[in-house]
Image (cartoon, rainbow, N blue to C red):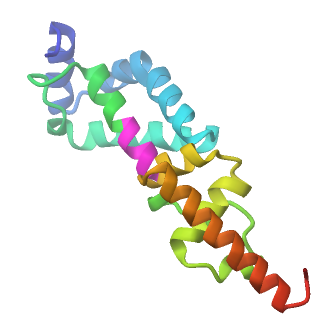
Amino acid sequence: MADERDLVLHRRLVVGDERALGEVYDEHAGIVYGLARRILCDPVAAEDIVQQVFLRLWLHPYDYDPARSGLRAWLSAAARHRAIDHPRRDPPHATYPTDAAAVKALPEGQRTAVVLAYYGGLSYRQVAERLGIPEGAAKSRLGVALRSIAHSLSQNGVL
């Protein structure tokens, strides 16, 4: 349940008060950024998440229901969901060099796991969290992908 300040801010957002958005941003942007940064391990992507979360609040203030939670909790949940969903919306191959034919030839799920783990430096657990799959599935996906890459490179005389 929201406190009185959150209720007032929500009412102001609903009527399009830009100052209310500024106040919410000043108070909560650091928390939203920190959460997104911990999940994504990427400061630029975390900044994008902050923009997306506050833009959503501005454009759709009724998405936040003060009767259900405080503004901080809602913003944190929105940031968490956006950050977890980020690799699906903005695939890693768009920001990491994956020109290698062996990597490009992988099915999308395997390619994404390889990019997150080897170009992004994420652990199995972090890859699993980002992709929304169990850790064992992430390990398996990476193992299959690496065997496929090795086979492809071997057939092309690279290995």
Q: Can residue 114 be spotted in the picture? A: yes
Measuring 56% from the left and 44% from the top, which residue is drawn there? 126
Foreground: 9 or 28? 28
Residue at point 91%, 89% (across, down): 157
From which residue to which does the magenta span run? 79-86
Look at the image and say whether residue 98 sits in the magenta stretch: no
Q: Main secondary structure of the magenta part?
A: helix
- Viewer can see residue 92: no
Q: Residue at x 36, y 28 (%)?
A: 76
Where 35 falls versus 89 (above or below)? above
Q: Give the side of residue 99 with respect to residue 13, left or right.
A: right
Q: What residue is at 66 percent from the left and 61 percent from the top?
A: 115
Counting labels gives: 0
> How far from the left and from the top, in percent, is residue 78?
33, 37
Q: Position of residue 55 (x, y in %)?
A: 35, 41
User: As displayed, is residue 104 above or below residue 20?
Assistant: below
Figure check: 90 above or below 52 = below
Q: Based on the displayed image, in which of its 4 quarters is residue 6 positioned?
A: top left
Residue 15: quarter of image: top left
Query: Considering only vertical position in the picture, is 117 above or below 51?
Result: below
Q: Which quadrant is the C terminus positioned in?
A: bottom right
Along the horizontal axis of the image, is 74 left or right of 152? left
Of residue 44 and residue 76, the one placed in the foreground of this image is 76
Residue 147 at x, y = what percent? 70, 74
Q: Is residue 103 left or right of residue 107?
A: right
Q: Hey, which residue is sitting farthest left in the picture?
A: 67
Q: Nearer the viewer, residue 5 or 32?
A: 32
